């Protein structure tokens, strides 16, 4: 029993330390603005990851998509799909859930049995036609440019990067995500 408690304690400490060791891509003294009028029903559906700030859970992922749908309990089902290394690489799927915490502010988990494993997912911008979105978190450890299509125009990219920069992000750290 004592060794089980020690093992669980070590796992807990490692889990708590991981977010603290994540890279930070944002000046947290800059206030973040969120999409306060986010229409969650219009946000649902499939999004392609166009660019992201590097993170440990997507290392080596290409062809990344995120699909959002309503669950019967009122939360949002989140299904992230990654192809490992190449567009014809092994497919990995992560199934999680998100809940609305405030307008434009969601929290996401892929480990529902760990109550402290929720991450902030703030929608900083969504195009009027819901064709593109910019997402980040207050700590600045994650951020994404998402679109309904696999590519976006240079004008859309500049707009998305401007939104990230206005929210304190260092856009020079963005990495493009290979799509078909």
Image (tube, grey):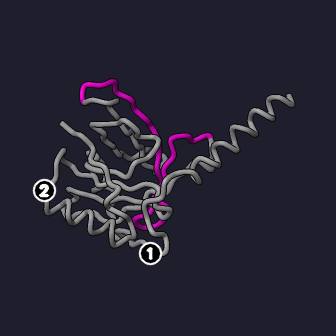
Name the residue rendered at 23%, 51% in the picture.
147
Name of the residue lying farthest toward the front: 172
Whether residue 47 appears in this view of the structure is no
Name of the residue lying farthest toward the right: 2
Position above or below: 13 against 34: above
Queried whether the magenta region covers residue 101, the answer comes back as: yes
Residue 145 left/right relative to 99? left
Residue 72 left/right relative to 132? right
Queried whether the magenta region covers residue 180, the answer comes back as: no
Whether residue 60 appears in this view of the structure is yes
Q: For the residue labelled by badge 1, is the local secondary structure a helix, a strand or a loop? A: loop
Name the residue rendered at 44%, 75% in the picture.
30
Quarter occupied by residue 132? bottom left
- The residue that mark 2 highlights is 153
How crowded pointer 2 is (Cα within 10 Å; few <14, some 14-19, many 20+) is rated as: few
The range drawn in magenta is 87-113
How far is the residue under mark 2 from the one under mark 1? 27 Å
The mark found on residue 30 in the picture is 1
Q: Considering only order in the chain, which callout, 1 or 2, is on the residue closer to the N terminus?
A: 1
Residue 100 in picture, x, y percent from top left: 46, 59
Position above or below: 173 against 60: below
């Amino acid at each position: 029993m004592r060794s089980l408690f020690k093992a669980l304690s070590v796992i807990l400490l490692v889990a708590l330390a991981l977010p603290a060791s994540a890279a930070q891509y944002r000046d947290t003294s800059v206030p973040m603005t969120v999409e306060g009028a986010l229409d969650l029903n219009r946000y649902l559906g499939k999004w392609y990851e166009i660019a992201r700030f590097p993170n440990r859970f997507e290392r080596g992922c290409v062809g990344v998509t995120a699909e959002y749908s309503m669950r019967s309990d009122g939360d949002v089902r989140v299904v992230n799909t990654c192809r490992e290394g190449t567009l014809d690489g092994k497919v990995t799927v992560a199934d999680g859930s998100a809940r609305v915490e405030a307008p434009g502010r969601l929290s996401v988990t892929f480990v529902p049995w760990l109550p402290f494993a929720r991450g902030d997912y703030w929608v900083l911008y969504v195009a009027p036609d819901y064709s593109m979105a910019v997402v980040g978190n207050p700590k600045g450890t994650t951020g994404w440019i998402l679109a309904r299509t696999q590519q976006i125009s240079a004008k859309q990219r500049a707009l998305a990067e401007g939104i990230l920069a206005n929210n304190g992000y260092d856009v020079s750290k963005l990495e493009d995500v290979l799509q078909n």
